[in-house]
Amino acid sequence: MNDILLNISGVNKRFGGLQALTDVGIKIAKGQVYGLIGPNGAGKTTFFNVITGLYQPDTGSFELDGKPYSPSAPHAVARAGIARTFQNIRLFGEMTALENVMVGRHVRTRQGVFGAIFRHRAARVEEAAIRARAQELLDFVGIGQFANRTARFLSYGDQRRLEIARALATEPKLLALDEPAAGMNATEKLALRELLVKIRNEGRTVLLIEHDVKLMMGLCDRISVLEYGKLIAEGLPAEIQKNQAVIEAYLGGAH
Ligand SMILES: Nc1ncnc2c1ncn2[C@@H]1O[C@H](COP(=O)(O)OP(=O)(O)OP(=O)(O)O)[C@@H](O)[C@H]1O
């Protein structure tokens, strides 16, 4: 089926004596917002890290846009077309918001970072285009007015938006967001939700891990549920909400 963007199957991952993932798979169609939920320690982050090349799986088959990709390293995954954010914000704190987004953009440009440093003519032209696009992305996520502010001086919610802008700058086929609402207050969450709806309305494909189940139910097209490293349910949000195994997993767990 060519409308499947991400097709992953048979992922196993063991940490010493702990089987963190057992035969986990996921299929995300183009344009879907796909949610991954589960109680604490279920293996969500591990699966995410495997998909994005941070952890090496013991087994697994990985296909993006109909082509096998090797999640051997984060850089290779970014080049293949997957951009991610992290649970703990990872920005270049001393750089401006605009520069942070420009760095993301360089993944996709011909000159790359070295071209930009040596400032050949072609690189200068490209640099201007990168700058303009970076500003557009900051406007899109709602922090365009802070383009020249040092990243670490942005509010927490704005830093999270900046991370998303930086990920979008790589023009990903898949945007993977690891708990984007973590640590946000109610107002920031509401604004984040609006941004995610905007991203969805652009037709982007998104994989989302999030603890806020209410947010997930309203936002996702489909949801997979992990418990103790195994998929226990997959379906529409309404189906997941009624699923007995899911209800028990959450009641039995820390949630
Ligand atoms: N690098 C690692 N080394 C050893 N064990 C790990 C490592 N990373 C995760 N684990 C273990 O794997 C299991 C799954 O953890 P993981 O962080 O993937 O769960 P999670 O669903 O993302 O949890 P949370 O919702 O708390 O973030 C846990 O038991 C965890 O302790």
Image (cartoon, rainbow, N blue to C red):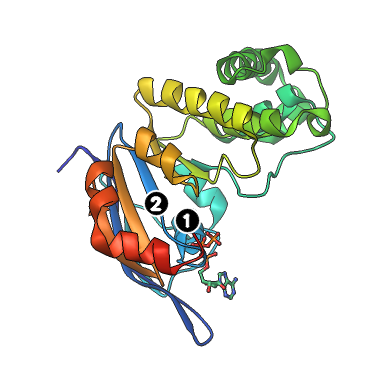
In the image, residue 157 above or below residue 69: above
Give coordinates of residue 253: x percent, y percent. Answer: 46, 67
User: How far is mark 2 from mark 1, CA to CA?
Assistant: 9 Å
Identify the image quadrant of the N terminus.
top left
Q: Residue furthest front?
A: 251
- Viewed as shown, does residue 178 lie left or right of 238? right
Give the camera-side residue of 240 and 145.
240
In the image, residue 136 above or below residue 61: above
Q: Residue furthest bottom?
A: 17
In the image, residue 249 above or below residue 205: below
* N-terminal-most mark, 2 or 1: 2
Q: Amino acid at mark 2?
A: Leu
Give coordinates of residue 33: x percent, y percent. Answer: 35, 36
- Viewed as shown, does residue 14 lie left or right of 187? left
Give coordinates of residue 197: x percent, y percent. Answer: 42, 24
**Res 64 seen here:** no
The residue at which mark 2 appears reads as 36
The residue at which mark 1 appears reads as 48
The residue shown at (76%, 22%) is 119
Q: Check disc 2: other Cα within 10 Å, few if <14, some if 14-19, many if 20+.
A: many
Give the camera-side residue of 205 and 217.
217
Q: Secondary structure at mark 2?
A: strand
Ligand 1 contact, mark 1 (Cβ < 8 Å)? yes
**Quick check: marks 2 and 1 in contact, CB under 8 Å?**
yes
Give coordinates of residue 188: x percent, y percent. Answer: 62, 29
The residue shown at (33%, 59%) is 247
- Displayed-image quarter of ligand 1: bottom right
The residue shown at (31%, 35%) is 32
The residue shown at (41%, 53%) is 37
